[in-house]
Amino acid sequence: TGDWAIADAFGFRQKMAQEVAQSPEFKEQLVTALAKEWSVPTKLDALLRPSVGSDSSANDSLVRLLLHVDTLQGEIASGLMQLLPEYQEEEAGAGGVPMVRLILSQFRWLERIVDGA
């Protein structure tokens, strides 16, 4: 997995919220692209791992950052939950952590749940 960096996590979340609000097509394309990436276990693992901050510190994963965008949260959360059965028998993923644990950890300590249904 390659490390990737987001210098300003809060700014990234704001920009994503803006883009989604301005263009419903962007939201659809983003969710479709994520689903495509999730179909490859190594890419899913990379999306669920913490990113590297501008000061080389660990930040939230890309998926977790996107879960903080209210208008994306429902579809991304649903997509992640649909992945759980696929990995429930797996003992450990590429980084030694079971994929199910990585997926569920994305929801831990979310600041806000938009629709808990």
Image (cartoon, rainbow, N blue to C red):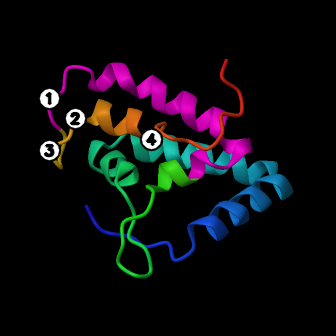
Sort mark 1 into few (<14), some (14-19) or many (20+) by Cα contacts within 10 Å: few
Q: Are the residues flagged by discs 1 and 2 in contact, CB closer than 8 Å? A: yes
Residue at image coords 66%, 70%: 11
Query: Which residues are drawn in magenta?
Result: 66-92
| Front residue (pair 73, 44) | 73
Give the alpha-carbon distance from disc 2 to disc 4, as whole Å. Answer: 13 Å
Q: Name the residue carrying label 1.
A: 91
Is label 3 in contact with label 2 (beta carbons under 8 Å)? no
Among numbered discs 3 and 1, the one appearing first in the sequence: 1
Cα separation, mark 3 vs mark 1, equals: 9 Å
Measuring 31% from the left and 23% from the top, which residue is drawn there? Answer: 86
Residue 77 found in image quarter: top right
Q: Residue 96, how many percent across, how many down?
A: 14, 44
Query: Which numbered disc, 4 or 1, marks the residue that appears first in the sequence?
Result: 1
* Amino acid type, callout 2: Pro
Q: CA distance from mark 3 to mark 2?
A: 7 Å
Q: Main SS of the magenta segment?
A: helix
Q: Secondary structure at mark 1?
A: loop
Contact, mark 4 vs mark 1 (Cβ under 8 Å): no
The numbered mark at residue 98 is: 2
Question: Image quadrant for the N terminus?
Answer: bottom left
User: Horizontally, is 49 left or right of 19 in the view?
Assistant: left
Please name whichever residue, 93 or 55, is drawn nearer the observer in this view of the structure: 55
Within-10-Å neighbours for mark 4: few <14, some 14–19, many 20+: many
Res. 48 mark: none
CB-based contact (under 8 Å), mark 4 and mark 3:
no
